Amino acid sequence: MKRMVVTTLTLLLPSIASAADVDFAKDIAPIFEQHCLRCHNPGNAKGDFSLATIDQARENEYLSAGDPEASYLLELVTSPSENEPPAMPKEGDPLTDEQRELLRTWIAAGAEWPEDVVLREPSLADKSWWSFQPIADNEPPAAGDAPTDWQKHPLDRFVFEAMTEKGLTPSPMSDRHTLIRRATYDLLGLPPTPEEIAAFEVDDSPDAWERLIDRLLESPHYGERWGRHWLDVIRFGESRGFERNEIINNAWPFRDYVINSFNDDKPFDQFTREQLAGDVIGANDPEVEVATTFLVCGPYDDVGNQDAAQAAQIRANTIDDIIRATSEAFLGLTVGCSRCHDHKFDPIRQTDYYALYSTLAGVTHGQREVATAEQRQTRHEQLAPLEEQRNTVQQQIDETEQAIRERAKQQEADIAADWTRPPVSRQMTEETFDPVDVHFVRLIVEGSESSPASDRSYRIDEIEVWTAGEEPSNVALAANGGRATGDSRVAQDFDGAYSVDLVNDGLFGARWIPSTPQLTIELPETQTIDRVSFSSDRKGDSVGNSVAAFVSEYRIEVSADGEEWTEVANSHDRQPINEAHRNHRLRQAVITGEERQQLAKLQKKLGDINSQIAAVPALPVWWVGNYSRPAGPFHVFLGGDPQKPGEEVTPASLSFVDAVAPPPSDLTQVGQARASLAEWIVDPSNPLTPRVLVNRVWQYHFGKGIVDTPSDFGAMGGQPSHPELLDWLARQLITPEAEGGFDWRLKPLHKFIMLSQTYRQSSAARDEAIAVDADSRLLWRFPPRRLSAEEIRDTMLSITGKLDTRMGGPGFRLYRYLQDNVATYVPLEEHGPETYRRAVYHQNARASVIDLMSDFDCPDPAFAAPRRSATTTPLQALTLMNHDFTLDMADELATRVSQDAGDQPTDQIERAFVLAFGRSPDPNERDVTLPLVEQHGLNTLCRVLLNANEFIYLN
Amino acid sequence: MNRRDLLGNVYTAMTGIGLAHLLAGDSRAASQSAHVAGETHHPAKAKRVLQIFCPGAASHMDLWEHKPSLEKYHGQPLPGGENLVSFQGKNGNLMKSPWDMPPAGETGKRISSMLPHMAKHVDRIAFIHSMHSKTNTHGPGCVFMNTGHAQEGFPSAGAWTSYALGSANDNLPTYVAMPDIRGEPPNGKANWSNGFLPAKHQGIALTAQQPIRNLDRPESISADSERASRELLSLLNERHAEAHPELTELRARMAAYELAARMQLSAPEVMELSAEPESIHQLYATNDANPLKAAYARNCLLARRLLERGVRYVNLYCASRASGVDGLLNWDAHKTLKSDYERHCPIFDQPTAALITDLAQRGLLDDTLVLWTTEFGRMPTHQEGTTGRDHNPDGFTCWMLGAGVKPGVTHGATDEFGRRAELDPTTVWDFYATVLHLLGFDHTKLTWYHNGLDRRLTDVHGNVIEPVLA
């Protein structure tokens, strides 16, 4: 049937069968662009074939000009048989019959491809997309129809106009109690104290609200709250992520830098420059260099890989994280989507992505000394004389050892004559001795394969203790009642991993990994024994492999009571296993008492000097990344694959905004490329940066941004609900202070927003408005919200009076950190007072799930989190009802309430409500609460209040 | 109220027209069609999924895919692989499997003699021998196998299933992760993350050894006190909700507290393994002398109890992380393949087979999809200087059975030696396109907007593996 249709269509379409009617640009190019170019472009080239130009089609003879039947290209897009789809395109719908006929006609007419025409798959949005346009220089609308209060503030006039268009009207102003709670949580992330609420409620001076805002903006808690927002945006995490996920203990200086920058109201253009290129613009200034932790605080894979192609891919992934973080945080663009091909939705070219790649390619993760030149000089001066002393003593030691070695050489033959037995064997080392009655047997290790001086870098897969007689029995075996003791390497998440129990389980393969030179076997009862055997590789499948590193020197001792021990065998007459062991034996044989004393003295001296060296204060070592000249040149990776280099790229800004924000000039120097990129990002002509920034600030004040996808201002992102307002604010932000602008400072912006009527509206719902705009995007009311995880925890600590307000320094942990090759994060059952700091100081690790924090949507910093979720789950209820932290806080709250209010339950209830909710209970609440306090105690009530909805919702 | 808000909540009290629809030039993100939990795209074959995961890269050619050429050319160089450098370094010559693979079942499928119990199920299984991965590293490999992305932070298949299907039993978690007693798998909790999907889609860790965190009422609080507390909490919340109709979340949170209370009753019941008859305990070997096998067996039994009570997705692990001693705690047999798998296979074999038997005898296989996965395969050569095998991302085996799966088939193959997927190469995305297909979903249409894209479990790839469908 299908074939019939094709034929019929062909017959029915005589009008396009004429070559003159086929226009390349109109008829052919769109077919290639929409169906082929996605995969077959110079940057991706699936099947090593690009259709951006005709060159490859000609070279490969896919096109035979003038002969459609001989053109492979046409065959590929045609069904080979009725039930088989055409081979191409692989993704998306097959070509229509009409399109195929156009191709056929075009080929038949000679497959003309106009010179210099390069095809691209079109993106959804082009350079004319709203966010790439210059910031409008607009004036607020008059809003003459607005209520008088709404006509004054520019922001209100914009908001009023937008809501009027949808027939909405503003809400009345909130009451004082609501306002102070709203503002305090908003700026500080903490509740106002009952005293602050009371004072504000009675303050009827006209500037009461403004003074409140000023007070809050001056509080150091402001930086803790708003710094946390920025840490979300830039995926700041304090573990490395991926398989090893080792914790990072020295990234906290950056967290403090962010908090301080907010508190100091550092202009955001400077803040941006420092984070992208602090090492360049602030070399040897720790306060500035620390900012570059921004580049290296994302997840990266540090497992190590001998496979070169995989290692290159991992490196590309690491740079990818930095590209994404940079472009999303500052520019609100998902440049990362252009890694494998041109962006599908935005006009971001693959070459734009790799231009950023070459800019950032010199950055590697890690830690380094961050210090001023003076600090370095001082340390050097302190160390130099000590190091000289150390060298002198070391030389004396070396001379003495040399003398011993020479003497040993002379006596070697005599000493070695005593080594008559074969060396120890990993597979089986056995000692026989005269029968002896014992209850305990122990192996004392004096040296290991790796070094005669190391008595604990060995492993044992099995040890046997044999009874004397005709039918010897292994009485060490656990199944026969033997019990092994000896300390092991610790795996806290699975204590059986390297356990000493592995030495007498009768199984080979898994080995005891000791942390002690001593293995003791307790027999079930006193036995007559005459033989002990042990091994590290009984199966013999680990020859030469360090997994079965073995004992090299040992003694075996026995005891009847576990107190008095008798030696029954040792390794001293065995041949040493290698040269190092041989030398050690010889040294032991010839060293004199006098030499021992002398060496001991020198070693002590050396130890003292080393202690002095260690006591010289070390320079700070921080996780700020490292920078080197990247080994260029850099290329586009075709399809994102580092093994397929494409066209060469050099550092550049983003091409599609060139016309609006001209590219910077100096992008070629090491590091300078990053500094120049930063300058371009904050250049007043760049329309993205200030729009993205004011939108973020707006979002944290109102719950949603004017653009509700704060890190995506592209075609997949949201449209601005108030585009004129967004531009007006963006312009205001970057306008210098002298001209009445905010000069890139956020505190004036906060104050400006909060002084509006819009911000101070009631959040009460109105049915008619809900029906039009349930999200409150048009701000006909103040959108209510749930507290964040940090706010919930901080509030509990705050109202109980237990909040430790110390700022800065190393963070605290709500998990047990286990590391055994890889890291495991186990949430704590109890949170001690050392954790009673603000949650911003929690050392947030990747891939950890931490009770209250994770339950209430504190994000895993695997990705940037430009917007927090506010989910509701039963797990939240379980955690908040049952975790010890809630119980502790309930007890602390009860203690504080009793101290404040005395013994009377009614007084206690009053105070508990005031502390928890910032208000008194009404008579009905008092009535229903009283029986609980009387029957079950005040702390029971406190636990209820901490779980109440009112505690975590804000309106 | 837009789609994301709607789904972020358990219940919503208010509805209204989203502003997104009012704005000119509606963004794609805001206008994408709402997915309502449980609304499948086509009739589903499977209602729930059991995913058994053997982390550490369980060797395809030593467990599931018979490679006679390895025996034949044992000790000779891998053709074309003379200078092969893989994850840990250089490789030696070809190494035959330490075990033979006798034919099993009516299909005569050959699997390792180390898996005698699993051999009884080969006729049920659809083997996929042509899997290949993007990465040769365990952590990203496990995360890739579980989320379709090698980078952590994306939702796992279980989270997508929870999003797609919703809960079938509000009293239990929708998605349960069961890590092994030996610890978490490589990359830990990222394997059962909800990623950017709402938190209710996260995998809840629950094993026979480790109950749901914070489940139990604290000992210091009496039942009476708890009851009175909950009553007062309801009263206060009710009054507050009445006074604040603008806070649409308040009712949802009250409902969540009720759900939590019901979970407190249901979860201990499901964990009560002693309610099972002795014959069942023997089938699974829950009291085996090997404590690791017994522990895994108890998790297998618990998995069945969870599935039959309506848990949608169980992510069950057999083995754990990299310990620094390769192959000790998981299937990562770099240096001593024989010793390592002589430890791991007996732990895995009987309990897993018992779980399949038990699901079958209860009729649960009719609508339960069972998956067996690992993150990648192993090299046909031995690692230089050892008797183990290095990582091989280019070829490995996964399998599926149960609801909607064609029994007793083999799809795809690696080359003669097991080095690379050769016949019908199959991606992780194909695997999950198939899983979602069986659950009633078109994998290209189950999406969630995040950072610039409508994200999918199958990234921008994936084709349903038709030959394994019944």
Image: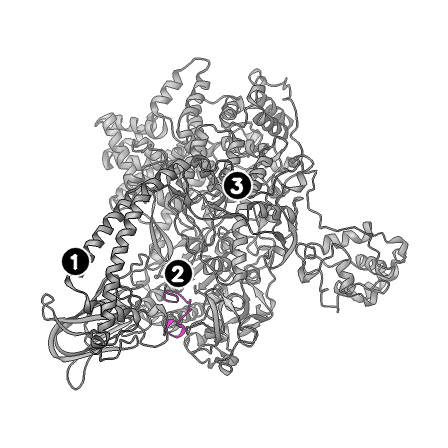
Q: Does the magenta portion include A824?
A: no
* Residue A732 pos. (x, y %): 58, 25
Q: Residues within 10 Å of mark 3 (few under 14, many from 20)?
A: some
Amino acid type for the residue under numbered disc 1: Gln
- Decide if residue B225 is on the left or right side of residue A208: left
Q: Is residue A16 left or right of residue B216?
A: right
Query: Which residue position is annotated with label 1?
Result: A597
For the residues labelled 1 and 2, the Cα–Cα distance comes to 49 Å
Quadrant of image for the C terminus of chain A: top left
- Label 1 environment density (alpha carbons within 10 Å; few <14, some 14–19, many ≥20): few
Residue B127 horizontal side relative to residue A428, left or right: right
Q: Are marks 3 and 1 on the same chain?
A: no
| In-image side of A374 versus B366 (left or right) | left
Identify residue for label 3.
B5
Instruction: Name the foreground residue: A691 vs A942.
Output: A691
Provide residue A489's location: percent of width, then percent of height. 29, 60
In which image quadrant can residue B282 be found? bottom left
> Disc 2 designates what residue?
B321
Front disc: 1 or 2: 1
Stretch of the chain drawn in magenta: B325-340
> Is residue B265 something one can see in this rendering?
yes
Identify which amino acid the numbered label 2 is placed on: Arg
- Return the chain for callout 3: B
Please tell me which residue lies in front, A51 or A756.
A51
Q: Is residue A932 visible?
A: no
